[in-house]
Structure formats: structure tokens, C-alpha cells
Amino acid sequence: MAKVDKQELGKGIRALLGDTAKSKPPAGEDKEQPTATPVREVSTDQIEINPFQPRNEFDQEALEELAESIKTFGLIQPVTLRRLDGSKYQLIAGERRLRASRLAGLKTIPAFIREANDQEMLEMALVENIQRAELNAIEVAISYQRLIDECQLTHEALSDRIGKNRSTVTNYVRLLKLPPGVQQALKSNRISMGHARSLLSIPGQEGQLLALRRVLEEDLSVRATEKLVREFITPSRSGNKTVKPKLPVEYQHTVDYLTKTLGTKVEMKRQSSGSGTLIIHFQSDSDLNEILDHFEDN
């Protein structure tokens, strides 16, 4: 599997968010690099909302609290804009600050003006959004997936851009395979990301939703959810007289570890002689590629 040139990707988040004061572009590339200008005051009426904004939900109470703070102290952190035709600007990053500033009645706000095409604007908006602490796991996952799809990044390239481990990117993106009911429970903090990752191991959305109902009704911990998931994967059959031989504890730990790490069903069949078979299930080519990526990283 072809590797992405890490040196090329090493520009990282500084290149996306404009830390140009600390990093000098290579010779001959000055015109191609987005550049930041000093902070200037821009009329709020001249600013259009970013069409690439990954967030579509803003807590009204939090906006009003920020607006009160802005009334007292002003807008401390400038927004980032790009110039459009005429006297109009388009927001790259800072929609929450812009909304709160308008609520506070500000007619002008401080802003960085940058040169950026649509591709660069999308990357900056998404990456800036990802760095915000209040995003829920599904919002992060959607932002990761958009960067992968719309900016044509691999999981490894994205991990370099945002300074996260490759496995972290994959774990977030896989959350989007969960049925809407599970995703909503995660967004509303009724379950944690640990619960969601465990539910991913259950093949089929019907089983995942049934398990979710148990988790919510019984208020199960992540560890208890992992046990529940194993029951869904290998259900007991009370009417079957043939008892399936259990794996030795150390081998079962290996199966559990692979199931959790790969996020899919893993089976091991072992003979008394020590020989055996390891089966890793996948539901699509995309799943297979993600599994292979795990082994490639190691």
C-alpha cells in the first residue's frame, strides 16, 4: 500500500491555521501559500457565513453568555476571513464568535484577512473546528470524514495534519457506520465513545440498536457493555447439548484485544496440538482496508 510523503504533509496544522510568523515558506512558493495580514476591524454586515462550516448547531445559552463577555471585554480572539468581490468578506473560522458579537451589538469586529481558495478554506474551517474542545464525537467524526473525502486525504495524512494518532482518526471515522439511533445517543452524551466503539463490534445495525437499548435501560458501564457485546457475538444456546470448548484465558484475551482494536468480530479456533485458525470478519472493502491499515501501521 503506497505511503504518503510525510515530509510534504509536515506543514501540519500551522500551514492550515496560518502560523506564518513561526514558519517561513520554501523559496519559490510564496505566491502559493495562504498569507495572513495584520488584524483589522471589519463591519459585521460585510461578513458572510462560511458555507463549509462543519457545525450546524450552536447552543443559544452559551452564545448569550459569550455575548455578555464580549460586551464587557470586547472580542479578544479575532475571526478569520477571506475577501470576496467588492467589500464583502467570507468567514473562514469563528462563526460562534461572529454570532455572539452580533448578539452583543458590535458593528465591527477584529479579523485576520487571508487569501484562500475553496479547498484551503474548507481545510482551515474543518481543522479549526476539530480543535474545539466542545465538539461531540460524531461532529469530530464528520469533520474527519469531510477532510478525507473532500480534501482527498488518507487516514495517515489526516493524522499528520491534525496531530492525532492514525488509530484515533480511524476510530472516530468508524463511528459514522453506527445506526442513527446510536449516533444520536453518543451526540447527546447518553453513551460514551467507549460504549459506541464496543457496539461497533456487533455485526448488523439491528443487533447494535438492541444492545444500545440494554445499555441505556441498565445504565451499563463500558466494561459491562463489552461483556454484553460478546454475548451478542456468541450467543448461548440453551437447547444445544454440545458445549463449545472454551479457549484458554490467554488466547481469549487475544481475541478480545483484536476485537476491540480492529472494531470487528474476531474468532479463534485452536487445537490441543497448538495449531489453529484466526478469523477476522469484515462487511465491505472499506472495512477490509481499515483492518489492513492497522497491521500496516505496526
Image (cartoon, helix red, strand yellow):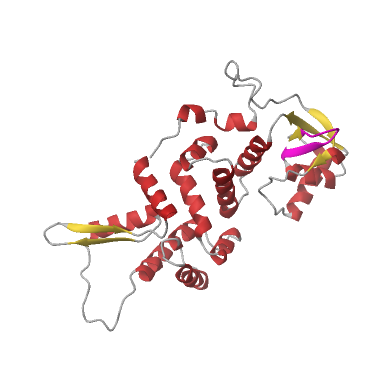
Residue 188 x/y as whole percent: 61, 61
**Residue numbers of the magenta segment:** 83-93
The N terminus: image quadrant: top left
Q: Report the number of numbered marks.
A: 0
Residue at the left extreme of this rendering: 273
Q: Is residue 56 above or below residue 105?
A: below
Q: Quadrant of residue 98?
A: top right
Identify the image quadrant of residue 270. bottom left
Residue at the image position 52 percent from the left and 70 percent from the top: 216
Question: Where on the picture, by quarter, is residue 131?
Answer: top right
Above/below status of 255 relative to 30: below
Query: Which quarter of the figure is the C terminus placed in?
Result: top left
- Residue at 36% across, 61% down: 265
Q: Is residue 74 visible?
A: no
Q: Is residue 80 left or right of residue 275?
A: right
* In-front residue for pair 2/15: 2
- Residue projecting furthest to the bottom: 239
- Compared across the picture, whether 226 is left or right of 249 comes to right
Q: Residue at x 25, y 81 (%)?
A: 240
Above or below residue 11? Residue 74 is below
The percent position of residue 294, horizontal first and vertical second, equals: 38, 46
Query: Residue 67's x, y, as percent?
Result: 80, 46
Residue 198 makes an appearance in the image: yes
In the displayed structure, does residue 84 sit left or right of residue 225?
right
At 68% from the left and 25% from the top, the residue drawn is 35
Instruction: Judge whether residue 10 is colored magenta.
Output: no
Q: Nearer the viewer, residue 199 or 253?
A: 199
Position of residue 157 measured from the top left corner of the image (x, y, whole percent)? 49, 37
Relative placement, left or right, of 237 versus 271 is right
